[in-house]
Amino acid sequence: MSNFAIDAKKANTYDAIVVGSGISGGWAAKELTGKGLRTLVLERGRDVKHIIDYPTGMKNPWEFEHRNQLTKDVRDANPIISKCYAFYEGTEQFFVKDAEHPYVQEKPFDWIRGYQVGGKSLMWARQTQRWSDFDFEGPARDGFAVDWPIRYKDIAPWYSYVEKFAGISGNKDGLATLPDGEFLPPHEWNCVEDYFSKKVAGKYQDRHVIMGRAAHITEPKPIHTAQGRAQCQRRTICERGCPYGGYFSSNASTIPWAAKSGKMTLRPDSVVHSVIYDDKLGKATGVRVVDANTKQMTEYYARIIFVNAAAINTNLVLLNSTSHRFPNGLGNDSGVLGKYVAFHNYRAGISAQYDGFLDSTTEGKRPNSPYIPRFRNVMAQETDFLRGYASGFSAGRNSYSDQNSVGADLKASLLNPKLGGWYVGSHMMGETIPKETNFVALDSVQKDPFGIPQLRISMAYDDNDEKMIKDYHEQLTEMFTMAGFTNIRTRDSKQAPGLDIHEMGGARMGKDPKTSILNAHNQMHQAKNVFVTDGACMTSTSTQNPSLTYMALTARAVDYAVKEMKKLTI
Amino acid sequence: MERRIALKNLAAATLGLVALPAWASNWTQATLLPTLPPASDALLADLVETIIPTTDTPGAKSLGVNLFVQRMVADCYDKTTQTTFANGLTTVDNLAKKATGQSFTDSTPAQRLDVVKAIMTSTDPQQKAFYNLVKGLTVRGYMTSEYVMTNLTHFQMAPGYYKGCVPVATKSVSPTSSGK
């Protein structure tokens, strides 16, 4: 090797590489740099700097040419992403357009993505509920997937660790199904939500309506002001980026914190092609990166590699990381890589109205809503389907005006709206069962614009999901009826998997290398210096919004990885 | 001087490479150009003003709601709706001429209101569709205009609080739902 080549290799060598800068990649960057490692963070999308790259963050409604409606051209060109509730004129810049990164839908799958520094942490729904042992013990008790290699006690201190830094609001509810955390003050109830919570508590011993735990700074602590973040201003336009840093995102929190250490090199526009595995050394040595602008391939090297590309893209990177030792994807002797992917079932909902509290209403805004933790099949199997569902719940009042007149009468009517009665509503968040038949795999022919194989995605609902939807409709109808709600209407959106944006698995954690990809520390069984701590690592899905668990698993895995590096085992 | 112009042009050229979303144009009433020819734009302006007229507060025309309506029809609706819109404007003018012998624009406000009421109550599906489209967009453009949201409905971008149970009497008309 010439001196020049040696120097070039040295220039591209770091202590650690993190693939992805979203919610888990940001945490990996913060923790690795915090422990003194020179860390290269690779992001396939463009840079999005906190505040200055939130072009719509301070815009008033009337400043949007189409008042936030998508144009026909955008909708026609993007049938997939246009289905996403958070995709509108003010957020178009943060979502991947359909043509940017094509994939093969072997079965209908709406893949919702955010390719930029911060990933989807910019636009996420900010719900942060802990898992309990009722979740971690699920697969072992109910006989699906494989047993989780960890239990609640393993992750509990790391939940606390990330919650304090991220800023999580919530109430200490003392529920075994949804453990309490390190909470900032909880969000406020409205009259009807409070009423419903009390009615449910009076009727059912095992059903609880609590305030959602959400990643909003309701009262800043010194650790938040040290990040340059301020109290949430209750604007409820979070997905445009928050100039106050009122909610947690990589952009507002972990990435600038890592940058401040002086140890981070952030390289946007870097599409990771694969992890390099050295057959002779018997370990991963780096990653191959396609520059998104020039399409040139460059190699970067490090002692440890964290793959945090987001669940499905992490599967893509690992499946595409082939070598003599691993012809079917990195660490994939077991053959389970890409399989047993799962998601959350968000198809079902229910709405109704309530005729009480007509002398009361709400004022201001709240970026959160109440939450009903899973109550089905918790202590024992009690239905004809496995597992259960959590539910979102909220109530409110809308104004309306009679628009049947015209002229001065219409104007007067518009400016003197009437207050409608209370509406109530709920949506289901169902656990789905990971199965070998739900998988992602590389397409043998089709490539993406970077020359990387396209993914074939094959995920579908099953009979268990259909039964769960039916039960949710029945149980929530019973609870709503008991509370005196009227005009109860159930719905099933029939939406395809993917639109829940909670896809998980494919590189699952487990005790046995024969049936899993990662061990109890998110470390690859067969490539010890590679760690996966995003959604791809999930053995099962439970019902909780998963991001908080990714954060905790990431901080825990970095702690382990750096200790192992010091012991020279990796 | 020349160098500054050159740099400015370079910046413009570079920016031009980026596909800027619609909001980047930083829309204001002053910069939003009509997509309709002047005569149709004038007719639409009088039409939205008839639907929401000036009283002790500004009406839809002076708030530029006609610009919003035509922009929305041009950018957010399909060909069929765009045709309904174009034909509807002609119909409005024809109805005015039939009733008063003058164009809609040259008619008096009272005459215009009669024409609009005729379309509003028409049994012709095309006229009905046209009226519902224009009325809906006019109401939306008016209610989400800066003037109305700032002075009349008192929109709060960042209330900083949520009160879940306040007496109805103290409620202002400010919409408290999502700030979208």
Image: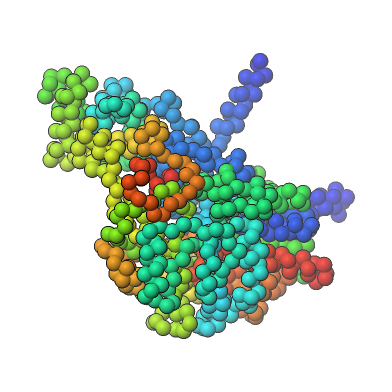
Residue placed most toward the observer, A559 or A152: A152
Residue placed most toward the observer, A36 or A529: A36
Quick check: B69 left or right of A324? Answer: left
Residue furthest toward the top?
B1
Write the residue at 42% across / 42% down: A68
Write the residue at 16% across / 33% down: B117
Q: Position of residue A510 (x, y in %)?
A: 62, 77
Quick check: B129 left or right of B164? Answer: left
Write the residue at 65% across / 46% down: A228
Q: Position of residue A43 (x, y in %)?
A: 64, 51
Q: How is the image coloured?
A: rainbow
Q: Which quarter shows the C terminus of chain A?
A: bottom right
> Is residue A306 positioned above or below B176 on the image?
below
Rendered image quadrant of residue B18: top right
* Residue A274 seen from this side: no
Rendered image quadrant of residue A313: bottom right
Residue furthest toward the right?
A3
Q: Position of residue A253 (x, y in %)?
A: 64, 51
Write the residue at 17% across / 24% down: B110
**Total number of numbered labels?**
0
Residue placed most toward the observer, B27 or A302: B27
* Residue A424 seen from this side: yes
Q: Position of residue A338 (x, y in %)?
A: 57, 69
Q: Which quarter shows the N terminus of chain A?
A: bottom right
